[in-house]
Image (spheres, rainbow, N blue to C red):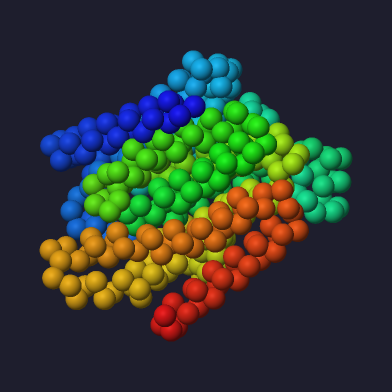
Amino acid sequence: MLHATALSALLCWLGCAALIVLGRRRHFGLDETQGVQKWHKHPTPRTGGFALALGMMVGMLWLMHLTYVSAPVTIRLALAIAPVLLAGVVEDLRRHVPPLWRALATVLAAGLAVWLLEASVTRLGLWPLDAWIHAWPVLGWLIALVAISALPHAVNMIDGYNGLAGMVSFMIFGAIGYVAFKVSDPLIMALSLAAIGALLGFLFWNWPRGLIFLGDTGAYLLGFWMALLSVLLVARNPAVSPWFALMVLAYPVWELLYSLWRRKFRQRAGTAPDTLHLHHLVYWRLTRLLDEDDHPDPRQRRNAATSPYLWAVAAFSVGPAMLWWGNTPLLMACCVGFVTLYLLAYRLLVQRRI
């Protein structure tokens, strides 16, 4: 499996290098520098997701060659993920794809995953919900549909600074792969390693220098992949608590839910971009002292310095998920604790007490 990881990393690394050169020479896929959520100084390719998809695809093919992943599963995965990739590519190259169309693409991809890969939520660890799901399996399908279609947007939401979404995704796939190893599930472990390898190749260029961005393609791909693997890991292995999936994904999931609530409370459209996410507050409050240094590009330095704070936030969800992946009551308590810590940190940052 490690050969596939290395191959994914190499192909993604080479793909990113080629796209950076193509962006500089042919202005291919460059991201604008003006906008509500723009923090970079120079036009930068937002096509990192293309290289990420290449690396993961080649890794998958090699895993299929090694018989860790069957050909039918590979084909079904490709069919399921096609809608989110298409939506991401069009947005990265043409811009201004209506949010409704992107949402429909993720719902279609989630529906295909539920149908083709049997990615259904079979239990929640809560009575009487588990009994209802057992009696009406369609409930499990609907929950999986919502979860898998929402995660691409959640990862896209946290993709605000160099290395943020990439490293958080790396941590999440590492946790999923670790638990898959513990329960002897080679399929989920192999798919996690393919993503880990590609992310290593991407992060080399993305952090700290920000030479290439994930773009919508990369964010959607990673979000879909981690949601799918989380659902399948729990469905295929009774020893894994269903709350493992929620805990390991707690940071992007809660960022999405809290942002939607915040925008509704402020009477703003749920899809309207703003600069009130936790990572924006960290940028404005905790890295401002870096502006005082004689650095040639203090804005870029602050950008790169923001992400490690959020990696620590993500570690408070990924760490407990790895430690207590089979303990439902403890994972429930950890989920409550994570949300509490998030809200406390958010409030302190808003009130400028940090």
Q: Is residue 67 left or right of residue 33?
A: right
Q: Nearer the viewer, residue 174 or 143?
A: 174
Work out whether 258 lies above or below 142.
below
Residue 8, position as x, y percentages in the image:
39, 30
- Residue 80 or 265: which is nearer the viewer? 80
Instruction: Report the number of numbered marks.
Output: 0
Look at 56% across and 55% down and name the residue there.
319
Position of the C terminus, as image quadrant, is bottom left
Q: Where on the picture, by quarter, is residue 90?
A: top left
Residue 46 location, quadrant: top left
Q: Give the x, y percent position of residue 63.
A: 49, 22
* Image x and y of residue 194, in percent: 46, 32
The image quarter in which residue 97 lies: top left
x 49%, y 73%: residue: 346
Please give the name of the residue rendered at 67% of the width and 36% of the height, measured from the top-left corner. Answer: 183
Q: Position of residue 7 (x, y in %)?
A: 38, 27
Q: Is residue 272 visible?
A: no
Query: At 64% across and 39% down in the image, what residue appears?
Result: 182
Placement of 245 over or under 233, stated as above or below: below
Q: Is residue 102 left or right of residue 248?
A: left
In the shown orientation, is residue 140 left or right of residue 280?
right
Q: Is residue 308 visible?
A: yes
The relative height of residue 46 versus residue 352 in the rendered view (above or below) is above
